[in-house]
Amino acid sequence: MRRVVAGNPGPYTGPGTNTWILEGDPVAVVIDPGPDDDAHLAAIEAKLGGAAVGLVLVTHSHPDHLPLAARLAARHHCPVLRHPELQEGDLVQVGKVRLKALFTPGHASDHFCFLQEEDRAVFTGDLVLGRGSTMITHPDGDMAAYLRSLERLLELRPVILFPGHWDPVDDPPAKLEEYRSHRLDRERQVLAALQAGSAGAAELTRRVYGAEVSGEELLQAAEMTLKAHLGKLIDEGRVTEDGSRYSLA
């Protein structure tokens, strides 16, 4: 297996988006081709070393994962599979590469992970990153669904995770529990912040995140994720929304 990191580093993408190449016989499978960028396409082709691609898989439709898929697939005359063509539990086999599709919404509503059952390896897209935490892209993302997706991976007991950003995770149970605990801790912080009185999302973001984040892009990501927390709490009857202000129920 090989990794190609796209040249799109940033606040949301870390060092860049990981494109994973699974070497099959006689063809390869590419997961998350990344942004539509000539240099990244050339880097993927260089890593392929002349091998053909038999299938392109995409974990979700965000612009740092999907856009290059059509061009890469056209060059190799192969299909692209993602939501909604993929369904939960679908088995995909190309040459010696065999993967099971796991529907894992939360970060995005169309998010899939891909499991190599024989190795208990999971390609996690943005469900789990190699470093830091992932944002929940409210309103498309869903916090309750995200937590269920984390629980699902915990139950699978994978031995390695190949994320959409940063390096592979070689202690998946610890990482998954870290992610789960972080989200539940943040939820408690949101409830504690509302004890100071009702507020809009921007004010609550400042109360909850404080000096943890700086810069407009990261603040936007924090507010988006906070709204996802609020959505879950509203659904559970613990928070109410009146216009654009939130209060404890």
Image (cartoon, helix red, strand yellow):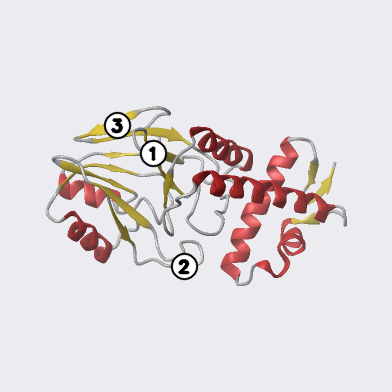
Residue tagged 3: 92
**Chain-order first, disc 3 or disc 2:** 2
Q: Is residue 43 above or below residue 108?
A: below
Q: Are marks 1 and 3 in contact (CB under 8 Å)?
A: yes
Q: Is residue 154 left or right of residue 167?
A: right
In percent of width and height, residue 221 lies at: 59, 59
In percent of width and height, residue 49 lies at: 14, 56
Residue tagged 2: 10
Residue at x-position 61% and y-position 62%:
220
Q: Nearer the viewer, mark 2 or mark 1?
A: 1
Q: Quadrant of residue 234?
A: top right
Q: Quadrant of residue 97?
A: top left
Q: Nearer the viewer, mark 3 or mark 2?
A: 3
**Chain-order first, disc 1 or disc 3:** 3
Q: Is residue 101 above or below residue 66?
A: above
In percent of width and height, residue 210 lies at: 73, 67
